[in-house]
């Protein structure tokens, strides 16, 4: 147990030294800026002659839009941090040194993952507490949301960190970024927009190409659809069609996560860590 704590502390320090602490500081500054801006907007609405209720609704709507942006950028930050810890320890020789001391690859990976979980947990709490300060002033959050809504942000972020970290165990940080940032956030939208633009000009679009673009997105879990934070639900229940089909969303989520974990495990088993002999 002591050795496990030591390893976790080691990788947590390495994660912080690799400029990840600046991401935490950036998150804190962003939440502080949002708090100041919302207060300024609320006072401006009142100065413009709006009633207290109208000013509260406008400020609350603005705060809700910020929450959507926080969730989107939060996913990207988690991807960036999750892809750093394992490749970084291989680059500076920490992994090689620990393996030479008969530390198993499994214990090594678990220690790195634990350090990553601690980092994501602290960042999530900072985001949640920072959001609650203006939200409580506007009265738009309930007691259950104060106590439990942060879990609806933490769990999706942990799922993202798990699949990204598992891939980074055998791939470089650059390749991991390309797989989980470049392809889903840049390449797929660019290909979709290109096909739509081409479809407006001609009907001769290869069926195989359009099908590949349609299905490529299904390789990635729809994490954004299950982030209910800062609330406990996505909104009021839908009483008219089209109704949300959560069954297929959950199936898509679980199968895509299983795909990346299985692929990562297969690549990790075949990955060559090199010699385990201590160098003089």
Image: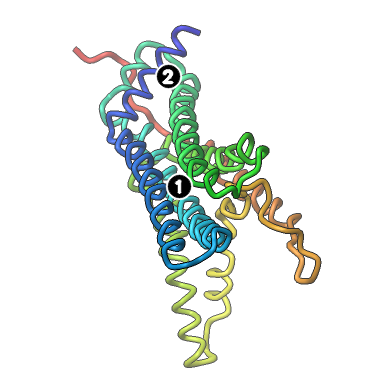
Residue under numbered circle 2? 8
Q: Which mark is residue 33?
A: none
Q: Secondary structure at mark 2?
A: helix
| Residue found 60% across the figure and 50% down from its top | 140
Residue density around tag 1, few if under 14, some if 14–19, many if 20 or more, within 10 Å: some
Residue 203 drawn at (x, y percent): 54, 91
Element class at badge 1: helix
Q: Quadrant of residue 235?
A: bottom right
Please provide percent x and percent y for residue 145: 64, 41
> Rounded to the nearest whole Å, what is the CA distance between mark 1 and mark 2?
23 Å
User: Left of 24 or right of it: where is 91?
Assistant: left
Q: Nearer the viewer, residue 27 or 209?
A: 27
- Binning the other alpha carbons within 10 Å of mark 2 as few (below 14), some (14 to 19) or many (20 upward) gives many
Q: How many marks?
A: 2
Percent position of residue 233, x then y: 68, 50
Q: Does 91 sit above or below residue 70?
A: above
Which is nearer the eye, 158 or 43? 43
In which image quadrant can residue 171 be found? top left
The residue that mark 1 highlights is: 74
Whether residue 144 is visible = yes
- What residue lies at 65% left-to-right and 43% top-to-bottom? 142
Using residue 252 as the reference point, say whether residue 131 is left or right of it: left
How is this picture coloured? rainbow
In front of the other: 97 or 270 = 97
Q: Would residue 188 appear left or right of 19 to someone viewing this image?
A: right
Number of the front mark, 1 or 2: 1
Q: Quadrant of residue 257?
A: top right
What residue lies at 70% left-to-right and 51% top-to-bottom? 250
């Amino acid at each position: 147990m002591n050795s496990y704590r030591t390893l976790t502390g080691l990788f947590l320090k390495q994660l912080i030294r690799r400029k990840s602490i600046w991401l935490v500081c950036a998150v804190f500054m962003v939440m502080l800026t949002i708090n100041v801006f919302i207060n300024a907007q609320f006072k401006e609405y009142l100065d413009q002659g709006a009633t207290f209720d109208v000013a509260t609704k406008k400020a609350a709507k603005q705060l809700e839009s910020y929450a959507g942006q926080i969730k989107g950028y939060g996913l990207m930050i988690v991807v960036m941090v999750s892809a750093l810890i394992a490749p970084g320890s291989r680059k500076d020789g920490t992994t090689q040194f620990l393996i030479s001391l008969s530390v198993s690859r499994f214990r090594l990976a678990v220690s790195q993952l634990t350090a990553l979980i601690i980092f994501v947990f602290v960042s999530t709490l900072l985001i949640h507490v920072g959001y609650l300060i203006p939200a409580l002033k506007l009265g738009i959050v309930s007691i259950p949301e104060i106590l439990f809504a942060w879990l609806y942000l933490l769990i999706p972020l942990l799922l993202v960190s798990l699949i990204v970290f598992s891939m980074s165990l055998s791939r470089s940080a650059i390749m991991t970024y390309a797989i989980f940032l470049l392809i889903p956030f840049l390449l797929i939208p660019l290909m979709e927009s290109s096909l739509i633009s081409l479809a407006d000009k001609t009907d001769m679009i290869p069926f195989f190409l359009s099908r590949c673009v349609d299905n490529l997105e299904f390789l990635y879990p729809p994490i954004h659809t299950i982030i209910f934070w800062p609330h406990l639900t996505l909104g009021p229940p839908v009483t008219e069609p089209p109704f949300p089909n959560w069954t297929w969303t959950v199936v898509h989520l679980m199968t895509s996560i299983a795909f990346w974990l299985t692929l990562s495990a297969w690549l990790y088993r075949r990955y060559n860590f090199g010699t385990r002999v201590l160098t003089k």
